[in-house]
Every structure is written in C-alpha cells, then in structure tokens.
Amino acid sequence: MMRELENKTKNNNTALLGLGISGFCYFAALGYVLPFVPILLRTSNLTYAEIGLVYMAGLFLSVLVQTLWGTLADRVGRKILVILATVASAVVATVYPHASTFTQFLLLGLSWFTFQAAATTVTPLIAVGASEPVTIARRFGKYRVSGSAGWIASTATSGLVSESLGVQTIFYLAAILLILSAVSIQISIKDQAVVKSEATAKGKLHSLVVNRNFLIFLVTILMANISATTFVSFLSLYISQLGGSASMIGWAFSIAAITEIPCMIYLGGLSDRIGRKPLLIAALLFYPLRLFLYTMASTSNLILPIQLLHGMTFGVLYVASVAFVSDITSESRGTAMGMYNTASSAGSATGSALAGFIADSRGLIDMYRFMAAFSIIPVLIFAFMAKETLRVQYSSHTQKPTGKT
C-alpha cells in the first residue's frame, strides 16, 4: 500500500511538472496571439461590429462543443484530446496572418475557439486528477501559475517582436510554442481513467442539470463573462485609440498576468480553508471597478495600473471556480468542467457581439461604461443565491470527506 501511494505521488508530481511546462508554452502562445488578433482584424478594415461578430461566432461554437469535449474526455481519455486540439491550434495560428476578409477571419475564429475550448476544458481535468481533494485549489493554482508565466513572457516581448519583425512572426512563434506544449503533454502525462458506462454518464449529467447550486454558479459565470470579454477582445483597440503603441499593448497584458501569480497561489489556496464563495464574491466585485476605471483613463499609460486588478478578476475567480466545480462532483468532472466553460463561452460570445455594436454606435468609452454597470448583476446573483461547496471536515484516518458539499 505504501509503495502504491509513493508511486501515485511520483506520477502526480511528474504530471504536474509536465503540465507546468505545457501550460507555459500554451499560454505563451495565447499571449502572442490574443492581444494582436483585434489589431489584425482592424487593420484588415473590419468594423467594430464585424470584429464582435467574429468573436461571437467562435465563442458560440465553443458553447456547443465545450460540454461535448468534457464528456468525451471522461469517456475516451483526456491526453489524446489535449494533444490533438493543441496541434490543430498551431495550424490555425500559422494561417491567421494570411487572412484578409471577414469570411476568412470568421472561419479561422470558429476553428480557433473550437480547439481552444478542448484544451482549456480538458487540461484542468488532468491537473485536478493529479491533486488530492483537500489541496485541489492550492495545487491547481500552482500549476496554473506556469501559464501566467508564459503569458507574461510573450506579452512582454510581443510588442517589440511585432514592431521589429512584423505581426506575422507573432503567429508563427505561437504555432511553435503550441507544438512544444503538445510534446510536453505526450511525454509526461499518463492518461487517466475514463467513464465507460453510457448509462452512468447520462445519470451524472442529469445530476448536474438538476443541481440548483451548480446552475446558479453557471448563470453567474455566464453573466460575468458578458462584461469580462472586453478585457481582451477590445482592450487592444482601446489602448490604440488612447495613443498607445504595440509595445504598450503587450505590456498591458503582461502586467495583468503578473498579478495572477500571487493571487492564484495565495488567494486561490485560501479557498481551501475559508471556502469558495467568499473568494468568488470578492473577485466578482472587482469587475465593475476595473471596467469603470477604464472609462476614466485619459491616456494609454493609465491603463497599465488598472491592469493590476486582473489578479482578482481572473486569477482568483478562475482558481476558485475550478475548485467550486470540483466540489460539485468527483466522477463526472469532465462534464461539469465542460458545462462551466460552456457558460463562460456563452457569456463571452454574447458580450463580444453586444460590445461591438455598442462601440460602433456609441464608442468604446460608452461600451465600457455599460459593461461596468452590467457587471454588478452577477455579483448580486451569486452573493444572495449561491451556497458554499467546500468540504470542510475530513477524517485524518480515511482521508475521505465526512461533511456535505
């Protein structure tokens, strides 16, 4: 028994190390691509509304496939899905700089978000599977920090690379990093057990659908992401409108990611002790503050200190959310995580289209004002309707939860 536990711990540590390397490469790739896609679309003469529609279409397609990816991961295995999706993303990244029309960008957006949905849904499941129940938030937070480090490294240099070597180089570097991410998964991860019973899988899906607390959480995440999508999809354009350079855009995203690291490690792990709900409420409260401060910025330089709030609006919210989902279920986490990402994507898709039309008709500042007011709603929903999920009592002998979720 002791030897079996030692082997399990060794395999878990190897898996988390490999996931860390993979996460660094994967999010470094995203750090090159995401801030500059809006710029690429705008310089290709797409309107704000068309840019919003490109994001909306891709995100709505990911809404349809997120839960499918999660359920499929529970049944056929997680490792192979992550590898295939990551390699496919690399192919899309190499094609992006060669597109020039709305239709071409629309097709690329649909492909990009579909494959990204698979990777971002299934990879956290592997990380959670390599963690003990009592340390899920802390261990997951430490793993996810590697992604933040990769994002910081790429966004800090992306502006200089773009200005000196051209935007195309950004996308080619991203493709190389995505391939390295897939290789790391292949080398370090042993695929985890799958759910083989179709009837059992259906029963577990039904148990999630009728779980009132989980549904309240999903509604909260959906509404929060309606406003949160503007942190990425329109911020580059807003910085440019305020006179910021490509380097300024890169630094804005880099500074934001730096704040994720302490928040994920310390505040994310805090949810293992005091509960998920207090941390989630605190994170949601920073959404209207951050969005409102954007509207007060008179120069691009003032965006940089506002980005320091990203640690709360993303870092804490994401880690505590994954822990919340893990609390809900242990045997059908893939399905539950897929439903969580579906809600996130649905909110982002709705928000992208809405923000694009508001920006076209009223301008970017009024768009951010609207989103600031709207982001108060999910705070109220979660604070007054959701219940705590943390399992607070564990037997020191059995290591099984004795309290209720």
Image: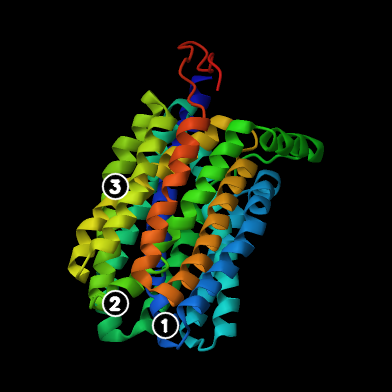
Q: Residues within 10 Å of mark 2 (few under 14, many from 20)?
A: some
Quadrant containing the N terminus in the rendered view: top right
Q: Residues within 10 Å of mark 1 (few under 14, many from 20)?
A: some
- Where residue 323 appears, as percent x and y from the top left, is 47, 35
Residue carrying label 3: 261
Which scheme is used to colour this image of the protein? Answer: rainbow
Q: CA distance from mark 3 to mark 2?
A: 27 Å
Q: CA distance from mark 1 to mark 3?
A: 32 Å
Earlier sequence position, callout 3 versus callout 2? 2
Earlier sequence position, callout 1 versus callout 3? 1
The quadrant where residue 360 appears: bottom left
**Disc number at residue 167?**
none
Q: Residue furthest right?
A: 199
Q: Secondary structure at mark 2?
A: helix
Q: Residue at x 48, y 25 (%)?
A: 390
- Where residue 401 appears, as percent x and y from the top left, is 53, 18
Earlier sequence position, callout 2 versus callout 1? 1
Q: Residue at x 45, y 81 (%)?
A: 41
Q: Is residue 216 left or right of residue 320?
A: right
Identity, as a three-letter code, of the amino acid under mark 2: Ser
> Is 75 in front, or is 231?
231
Quadrant containing the C terminus in the rendered view: top right
**Disc number at residue 240?**
2
Is the C-beta separation of discs 2 and 1 under 8 Å? yes
> Is 321 in front, or is 181?
321
- Where residue 383 appears, as percent x and y from the top left, is 45, 33
> Is 153 in front, or is 35?
35
Identity, as a three-letter code, of the amino acid under mark 3: Ile
Q: Is residue 264 above or below residue 235?
A: above
Residue carrying label 1: 42
The quadrant where residue 332 appears: top right
